[in-house]
Amino acid sequence: MVKVLSIDPGKYKCGLVFAEISDQKVYKAIVLKSDILDDFVKNLNSVEDISKIIIGNGTSSSEIKKKLDFLKQEIITFDEKNTTYRAKERYFELFPIRGFKFLIPREIFIFNKNLDAISALIILEDYCKIKFTLDQNLDLKTWLK
């Protein structure tokens, strides 16, 4: 089993997706403050065997890569061009609008939503060249501690 962590880096917050490549499933998707990223990844790695880390090449990616260097796993920097823009479209693929809500402009449903985790998913999908599904037990949450 190849378990990967994909990170959409940011100066203040990061989106993370933890997935299994052979299952093509996402098991964790969160957003957290950049200053607690290394502690979160350290804790996750103690429970899960992370094979590879993929980091988007945008804002503060080099600093985050240095922070995670202690892991000794392969850390890959990958192109993240337009992922935030594309995350809005991917959001509606993952969470389609149903019923009468279809009559309301769909941008209202992502107003104030944090798309960083979905951007991390897009980085992972672009890197692997496959689409991932969300595990049915996935708890989508935002951690901004």
Image: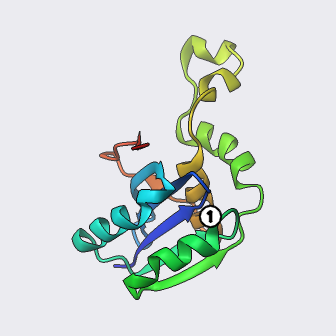
- Let me know if residue 125 appears in the view: yes
SS assignment at label 1: helix
Is residue 141 shown left or right of residue 99? left
Nearer to us in this view, 53 or 109: 53
- Residue at figure coordinates x 61%, y 53% from the top left: 119
User: In the picture shown, does residue 43 fall above or below 96?
Assistant: below
User: In the picture shown, does residue 91 fall above or below 79?
Assistant: above
Nearer to us in this view, 60 or 103: 60
- Residue at figure coordinates x 34%, y 47% from the top left: 138
Is residue 133 shown left or right of residue 119? left
Whole-percent x, y for residue 76 in the image? 58, 81
Number of numbered tags placed on the structure image: 1
Residue labelled with disc 1 = 123
- Let me know if residue 128 appears in the view: no
Q: What residue type is labelled 1?
A: Ile
User: In the picture shown, does residue 119 fall above or below 71?
Assistant: above
- Residue at figure coordinates x 63%, y 77% from the top left: 77
